[in-house]
Amino acid sequence: MITLKQMQCLLAIEETSHFRRAAERLGMTQPSLSVQVQNLETELGLRLAERSRSGVVLTPAGREVADRARRIMNEVQGVADFAAGAQGGLAGVLRLGSKPTLGPYLLPHVVAALHRSHKDLRLYVRESEPRFLEDELGRGVHDLVLTQLPAVSKEHVAEKLFAEPLYLALARDHPLAKEDSVSVSQLRDLDILALSQSYHLYDQIASLCDSFGARLVRDYEGTSLDALRVMVGMGMGAAFLPALYVHSELTARSEVIVRKLKGRTITRSVGLVWRKSAGRGDSYRAIAGVIRDVAARRFKDLSVS
C-alpha cells in the first residue's frame, strides 16, 4: 500500500533536491528514506527520482506524483488542524509567512496581542519573497500568509484586513518637500524609485507612474524599503512608501519626509490567506480579527475592513 510516510519522503526530496538533507528534515536516516522512496516506486511501477552529481531531481512522473501527494498531505493536515481547532481553538504552533514590506512593521504588535489573549498559541513567523508566498502556502511551507491582495490561487481563502496608504517620499531638500501636500499634476516627469519586480508593489507603482505621467526609474530598483529610503534621501528620485513603514522607520530627523497627494488616496490592500483545505478556518479568522484590532488601535490612517 502507498503510505503517507512514502509521500512525505518524496516531497522532502523535491523540496531539498538532496537525499541527506531530506532525511535530516524528516528526522530519519538516509538509508531509511531511500527505502521509503524505493518502496513507493515499486508500488507505482514508476521511477520517481534520478540521482545526479549535484543531488537528486524528480522525473516527470515523480513531479506529477509529488503534486498529487502534496494535495493529499494538505488534506491530511487539514484533518489535524480541524481536530486541534475543535479541541482548544487557537493553540499549538502556526507557521505564518509574511512579506518583508509588512511583517517587521506590523507583526511585533500582533504577536504581543496574540500572546496576551491566547497563551497556548505559538506563531512561527517567516519572511519570504513576496511572489513566492502563495506557492509556498500551497506547498505547505506556511499555514497562512500575510500579504498584499488580491490572492491568485482559487485553492486559497483570502480575508481582507485593511487598506494601507502609500505616501510620497521625498528628500528633505527636494523642491516638492516645501509643499504641505502634492498634486497629481506635480508628479508629471518626476523620477520615481520602486522596489524590484519580485514585489507586488512594483506593479502598482509602475501603473501609478503611467497614470500620473511620472518616470519609473528602472536602473535603480530597491532591494528593500530601507534601500529605497536611502536612495530617496540621496536625491536619486522620489518613492511611494507604505504607511506602516513610515510609522516605524521615519522620524523627525530622517533624511526623508513624506507627503500626501491632494484629493487622492493611494492604498494597497492587505490580507490574510490560507488554504481552503485547512480545517482551521475559524481559528484563522480569529487571528484576522486580532490583526484588525491591532491595526485600528495603533495605526489610525489604516482603513480596517
Image (spheres, grey):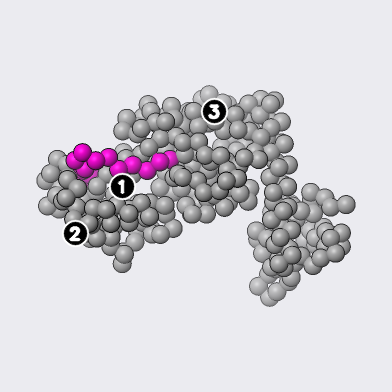
Q: Which residue is mark 3?
A: 286
What residue is at 15 percent from the left and 51 percent from the top? Answer: 186
Residue type at the position of mark 1: Leu
Instruction: State how far apart marks 1 and 3 are (Cα).
Output: 29 Å
The answer to which of marks 1 and 3 sits earlier in the sequence is 1
Q: Position of residue 233 (x, y in %)?
A: 23, 54
Q: Is residue 115 above or below residue 29?
A: above
Picture disc at residue 229: none
Observer-nearest of 246 and 130: 130
Q: Is residue 160 above or below residue 230?
A: above
- Neighbour class for label 3 at 10 Å: few (<14), some, many (≥20)? some
What residue is at 79 percent from the left and 67 percent from the top? Answer: 47
Q: Does the residue at mark 2 contact the one at mark 3 (Cβ under 8 Å)?
A: no
Quadrant occupied by the C terminus: top left
Observer-nearest of 99 and 272: 272
Is disc 1 placed on a helix, strand or loop? strand
Residue 104 visible in the current orientation: no
- Horizontal side of 292 relative to 166 (left or right) equals right
Q: Position of residue 191 (x, y in %)?
A: 22, 59
Residue type at the position of mark 3: Ala
The answer to which of marks 2 and 3 sits earlier in the sequence is 2
Q: Which residue is mark 2?
A: 189
Q: Which residue is mark 1?
A: 241
Q: Is residue 24 covered in magenta?
A: no
Q: Position of residue 212 (x, y in %)?
A: 23, 53
Is disc 2 placed on a helix, strand or loop? loop
